[in-house]
Image (cartoon, rainbow, N blue to C red):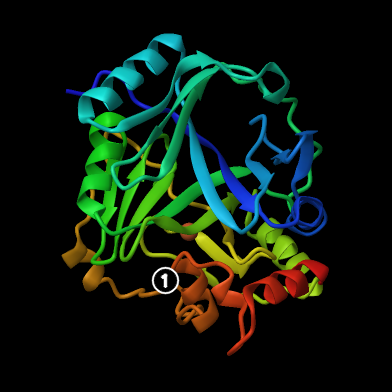
Amino acid sequence: MINARVTGLRSVELGVLDLDKSAAFYRDVWGLEQVVSGGDTIHMRGTGAEHHVLTLRQRPKATFLGVHFAAANHEAVNKLHGQVKAHGATITAAPAALPRDEGGGFGFAMRSPEGQPVFVSCDVDRLDVGREDRSRPTKLTHVVLNATKTDAELAFFLDALGFRHSDSTDMMEFVRCASDHHSLALVRTEGPSLNHMAYEMANIDGLMRGAGRMKQAGYNVEWGLGRHGPGNNVFTYFIEPNGFVTEYTAEVDQVDEATYEKHDAAYWRSFPGRPCRWGMAGHPSNRLKVAMGGNPVAAQAADGERCEDVMAKTLAR
Ligand SMILES: [Fe+2]
């Protein structure tokens, strides 16, 4: 019996080899804006009201450090904490006030059954909506995780955090916590690791302006332009300087809870618009498939090339 549910996706946290160069990429090329920095950490916002949609932390290697979700209020945070404990997942930080200079609020931290770091918070500062620029991301709209124990991960997000199940394919499970068709998806593959993160663009014109800015800066479109089956969102995928996969997306389906019907893998197996409803996108590049597999540095490496050299080369770009 679900008593409390998370209500939205806030941000993703990445460990990066070179904090300043990574922040410069996300500011000047990807289109985010620095909000707070201190020590080994930089928080960045989109044009929406969320305090930050990306946190970068200096680390010895590129590392996925977790995903943050929103809850409605203190009571919901405490109930979710109880649900997670009852589910048997590991609590890594009990509900408490969060650092005032990082947006504040109240929240707790946990590990999913497979060990993915997950955070839930409420009452984080909201920012004035940024200047209108459709070429820049409005928010983080979904995160996709690779999971070996996919069914255990799925049960955790559905039963402990109150997600709703939007769609199943042979490879993936799509779950939602707000009106977006999915805020999280799980891939049935080797895990745990980050498959990719997706940032929302205001419309297709804005998505293309962002994709063009990436292309002019030397980043190939590794998959897309296309329109997905589940979620119906328009997509372009890139590999960022640390080797993580990042997506610009637009027009994801908005779910009407009263009428929405989940589709199963058999439905999507026979869906005519695979892997792109437009017939445009074809399949991901081989290097994107490697990067989505959760070894970001390997995705950049030529035969025999050292990971450190790849990182230095891409960060210098
Ligand atoms: Fe995606």
State whether residue 174 is above or below residue 101: below
Q: Is residue 22 left or right of residue 156?
A: right
Q: Is residue 157 visible?
A: yes
Disc 1 residue type (three-letter): Arg
- Asked which secondary structure carries label 1, the reply is loop
State whether residue 120 is above or below residue 111: above
Between 209 and 97, the one lying in front of the other is 97
Dot 1 beta carbon under 8 Å from ligand 1: no
Residue found at the very far top of the displayed protein: 75
State whether residue 92 is above or below residue 183: above
**How many numbered marks are there?**
1
- In the picture, the quarter occupied by the C terminus is bottom right
Relative image position of residue 310 (x, y in whole percent): 69, 75
Relative image position of residue 98 (x, y in whole percent): 59, 19
Relative image position of residue 30 (x, y in whole percent): 73, 56
Q: In which quarter of the image is residue 236?
A: bottom right
Residue found at the very far bottom of the displayed protein: 303
Residue beneath disc 1? 277
Between 28 and 291, the one lying in front of the other is 291
